[in-house]
Amino acid sequence: MGDLASYRLSDFILFSETVYYRQFELYNQAVWPLHTVAILFSLLLGYALWKKPAWAGRVISGLLVVAWLWVAWDFLYQRFQQIHVVAEYYALGFALQAGLLASYGVIKNRLTRCTTSQLRIMISAMALFVALVLYPFTPLMIGRNWLQFEMFAIAPDPTVLATLAILFIYKAPKALYVIPVIWVIVSGMTLFVMQ
Amino acid sequence: MNNQHNQFRRRFLQLMALGASGLAVPRFSQAGTASFITKPIPSSRERLPVIGLGSSRTFNVGNDPLGLDNVAEVMRHFFNAGGKLIDSSPMYGSSQTAIGYGLKKLAKTKAVFSADKVWTWDHDESPVQMEQSRQYWQVDSFDLMQVHNLVAWQQRLQTLARMKQQGQIRYVGITTSHARRHEELEQIMKTEPLDFVQFSYNILDREVEARLLPLAAKRGIAVIINRPFQRGELIDALKDKPLPDWANTIDCKSWPQFLLKFVVSHPAVTCAIPATTQVAHLQENMAAGFAPMPDAAMRARMIDYVEKIL
C-alpha cells in the first residue's frame, strides 16, 4: 500500500468539470419529482429551527439521517461511482454519518441544547440560507446549465453545509463534525483540482 | 563486456535506422496521400501508428448517453485517420465502458490495438479485474496488458507473463506517470522481459531522454508516451504564443502538432497517447502522425524556442 504515497489528489480526479456537473444534470432528471420532497424537508427544517417545538431535535435529526442516506446511496454510490473510483468510500462515510446522527439525535434524542450565542446563530442562519435557498441557484449565477443545480437532501454539498449549520446551532459533539468537515475539504479540493 | 557493448550498439543503431526510415520516408497510399507513420514494436516487428489515443479523464463519462456518443465520435475520427492503439485503465472510472461502447458502435472490436492495465494490490483480484476490463472493452482479448503505475509489479508481471504464454494477451508492459518512480522503473526495465513500457515525456519534461529512452532502445522495449501535453497545461501555456515560421518546414500548423511531433520523433518512442474529448483536437493530434518529422537539429531548435517563450 506504500505505492499510494506516489499518487497525488489530481491522479484520482479523473473526470472533467463538464462531466462532473453533467452528473448533476442527469441525476436531477432521474430523481425528479423527488425535489418536491426535498423542498418539504427544507421547509420542515426551517419551521423546526424557528419555532423550536419539543419534537424539533428528533425530527431534524431524522430528516438529516434520511438526507445523508439518500445522498450516500443514490448519488455517491449509484451515480458518482461511475466516474470516480473512490466514490464508494465517500458513500460509506455518508452512511456512517447518517448512523451517527440517528444514534445521537433520533435514538438518544440529544440534539436539544441550542446555542445562545448571537454570533453562532447568525453564522448558522447564513450557512443554512446558502445551503437551502441559494445553492440550487448557483448554476444560474455562474452561467452553467440550470438543470445542473444541487439541492439539500439530493446532492452532497448543500446537505453537508446544512448539517454543519444545524450542528453549530445545537452545540453538537465534535464527533458529529468530523465527516462533514472532511467532506468540505474533499469536495473543495475536488472542485479546485478540476478547474 | 565488449560483445555486450557491440550488441547494444548494433541494436540501438538498428532502432535508430528503423525510426529514421519510418520518419523520413513516408509511405503513400494508392490515393496519393501520405500514410500515417508507423513504428515497429521491437519484440514482434508489428507496426503501430505513432499517434494513439489515451482515455484518462476524457472518456470517463459515466452512463451519459451524450458523453458516450461523443466518445464514439472521437474514436470514429481516430480510426478514420489511421489510428489503432487505444489505452485505458480500471483506474479511469467509466473510460473502459465508454471505449467498449465506441468499439461496438463502430464495429472496431477486432481492428483496435487494445492496451489496458491491471491496477490492484490484491493478487487474487487481478485476474478478475482484467476479465472485467475485457468485458467492458467488449474485445475477445487484450493486445497489451500493462502493470499500472508499478502497482505490485513483481506479482503482476509474473501473472502477465503467464497470460502471454497462454495466448490470453499478446504483449506485456508496465507504466508510470510519476517521475519520482523512474529509478525503480529503470531497474525493472533492466531485469524483466517487457514488450512495452509507458511513461511521461514532453518538450519540457525530458528527464527520460537521459536513461529510460536509451535503455528501452537497448533492451528492445516499445515505448508509449503519456501526458505529451502535460495534461493540457502545455497547450494552455502556449496557445497565445506564436508558432515559429520554421514550424512550416515540419508541417506543423498548431501547437499540439508541434508538441506531438517532438515526442514521436524521438527514435526510441513508439507512440504517444494524447487524450481528448473533441473531434477538432483529435484531428489536430492525428495530423502530427505524418511526415515530415523533425530531425535531431530541429528537435533541439524546438526545445530552445519553447523554453525561450515560456
Image: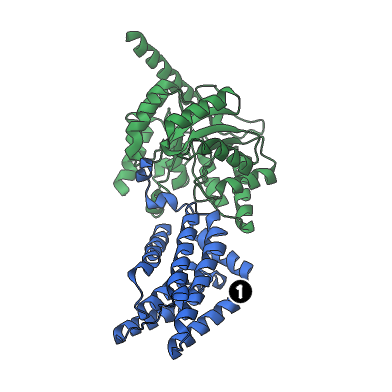
Chain colours: A blue, B green
Farthest residue, direction bottom: A51
Percent coordinates x, y for residue A153 in the rendering? 52, 73
| Residue drawn at point x = 40 percent, y = 60 percent | A186
Q: Amino acid at mark 1?
A: Leu
Q: Nearer the viewer, residue B45 or A59?
A: A59
Is B4 situated above or below B41?
above
| Residue drawn at point x = 58 percent, y = 76 percent | A35
Instruction: Tell me the residue that label 1 is attached to.
Output: A34
Callout 1: 10 Å neighbours few (<14), some, many (20+)? few
Farthest residue, direction front: A108
Q: Nearer the viewer, residue B270 or A40?
A: A40
Q: Is residue B301 left or right of residue A137?
A: left
| Residue drawn at point x = 62 percent, y = 53 percent | B68
Is A159 situated above or below B233?
below
Q: Quadrant of the N terminus of chain B?
A: top left
Is A99 situated above or below B140?
below
Kind of element beneath mark 1: helix
Number of callouts in the render? 1
Is B45 situated above or below B88?
above
Q: Is residue B190 visible?
A: yes
> What chain does mark 1 sit on?
A
Q: Is residue B27 visible?
A: no
Farthest residue, direction top: B3
Place residue B49 in its image quadrant: top right
Percent coordinates x, y for residue A103 in the rendering? 45, 70
Percent coordinates x, y for residue B103 in the rendering? 65, 43
Percent coordinates x, y for residue B37 in the rendering? 54, 32
| Residue drawn at point x = 47 percent, y = 29 percent | B157
Q: Nearer the viewer, residue B124 or A36?
A: B124
